[in-house]
Image (cartoon, rainbow, N blue to C red):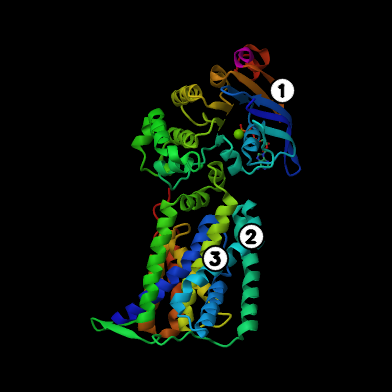
Amino acid sequence: MMLRVEHVDVRYGDLQVLWDVDLEVRQGEIVALVGSNGAGKSTLIRTIAGLVKPSGGTIHYGDALLNDKPPHTIAASGISMVPEGRRLFPKMTVLQNLEMGAFLRKARPQKETTLDWVYEIFPILRKRSHQPAGLLSGGEQQMLAIGRALMGRNDFLLLDELSLGLSPLLVKQIFDVLVTINKAGITLFIVEQNVPMTLKIANRAYILETGRIVGEGVARELMESEHVKAAYLGMA
Amino acid sequence: MGQTLVYGVLNGALYGIIALGIALVFGVMRYLNLAQGSLIILGAYGILFLFHLGVDPFASMPLIAFLLFLLGGALFWASFSRLIALSEAGRIKNSLLISFGLMLLIDNLATLLWTGDERSITPAYSGLTFGIAGLRFPLIGCVGVLSALVIIVALHLFLARTYFGKSIMAVSQDHEAASLMGVNVNLTCLVSFAISVGLASIPSALIGLKSFSPTVGIQWFNKGVIVVMLSGIGNINGVFPAGLFLGIMEAISVYFFGAPYREVTGLVVFVLVMVLFPKGLFKRQEL
Ligand SMILES: Nc1ncnc2c1ncn2[C@@H]1O[C@H](COP(=O)(O)OP(=O)(O)OP(=O)(O)O)[C@@H](O)[C@H]1O
Ligand SMILES: [Mg+2]
């Protein structure tokens, strides 16, 4: 077991947004978390990354308890994240953003090799390498956000809402990349509103509604379930 | 007129180096450290103390820089570190409150220890000047400009080339994203704050060689803040030219209207620039 989330509650002040969330991700898997606006998907992924502290429950990565660790320690212990809204360093160039991605001590010596790999996955980034990240198109920014996360050389990647605001063609391209990355041995935990695309590439999925996990299963089977069809695939 | 410009440039370099410390902390953390001027004056007393023991003011600058760096780290740890979690507006407001208290504390402590008398550090070479092309250059002022330039280039290289420097830049642009890259944001902020207080040692020496008393810190802080605004917030590379700009404008006004209008000119220039170029004089086009 790589990641194990057990009985996790999260609150913002008096407002509780996650209740008793249980989920797990095994090595090499692509696991999806789907749910509508405001369900608490970002909150959960941010809690795993250490940006939000859970008020109850435990989060384990391997044998390590992550609950009270700060985000930089969690990053160092093997988890990278592509945050919602990309969160690039806008005044840095593409290359500088990628170099910041390799800030982790273990990633530094391999920086050049990883950079070649990232440029191979996203050739457009090589062309744009000396442009400020803030001037890239939405699609290029998303590619840079993924590339920056890959630079950290971590085995586990959290991805929040990659498809937001991108054309269907770009979304397809990016999801193809996710499959490639996964084949290279990186475990993926994907939060998405684009349910059909996500369930196509995921091994397993969880459904989050108003802060609770209401369903889980093999992605292919979930696609056939009446509830998912009605609520997320637009098939009444 | 040429002579006036020389003094303008020398003063401007001093403004620039004062502003550098303020800009670093404001750029990275959105803290406005009102006590920076008082810390500069505290450093000046330190240099004066060592001078009485026979140490040359420029020779004691590195030691004072190191002590101020430690003091800065301690101050951050004790009183500013908790603000990092706040919103940008919250950080500005609360840092103003805390640093205002700190300023009063340091100023009163200095008065207690050294009285309110005006002091000056006076090594043998303090009045020396040399002439080039018919203009007179005060030795100390020129050494000051040179050391300011060296420090600015060094800081620039540190921020642009080292991993730690880059992490400071990353935190200034998006501290949450930086933490996801593995950057220890609290530590980065602590060190940036400590560096900024350490940087006060250069104006400590330069102001110390002019004259100072326990309560003049805030006046120097004001110059620094004006320069930071002129440069454009978050633009550390523009701070030095902005300092020179203010120094030269002041010098020109003194030439035409006389010394009493010097402070007014600074403020008028400030208001004009803010109205005409609200993003600062030297800010690159915003993304
Ligand atoms: N920092 C915060 N402070 C207070 N409430 C918050 C905060 N962040 C999120 N919330 C609330 O928590 C709930 C869950 O938000 P979250 O962003 O996790 O949802 P989401 O599933 O990611 O939604 P979306 O699909 O819009 O990204 C929402 O009701 C939101 O208003
Ligand atoms: Mg979200």
Residue designated by label 3:
B69
Residue designated by label 2:
B77
Image coordinates for residue B63, horizontal then vertical, percent: 51, 71
- Tell which of B285 and B99 is nearer to you: B99
Chain under numbered label 2: B
Q: Badge 3 local density, few (<14 within 10 Å), some, or many (20+)?
A: many
Instruction: Answer left or right for B48 relative to B154.
Output: right
Majority secondary structure of the magenta segment?
A: helix
Image coordinates for residue B163, horizontal then vertical, percent: 46, 49
Could you confirm whether marks 1 and 2 are on the same chain? Answer: no
Q: Amino acid at mark 3?
A: Phe
Query: What separation in Å lies between label 1 and label 2 (alpha carbons)?
Result: 44 Å
- Secondary structure at badge 3 equals helix
Q: From what the image shows, is residue B174 above or below residue B26?
A: above
Q: Quadrant of residue B123?
A: bottom left
Q: Badge 1 local density, few (<14 within 10 Å), some, or many (20+)?
A: few
Q: Which residues are magenta?
A: A219-223
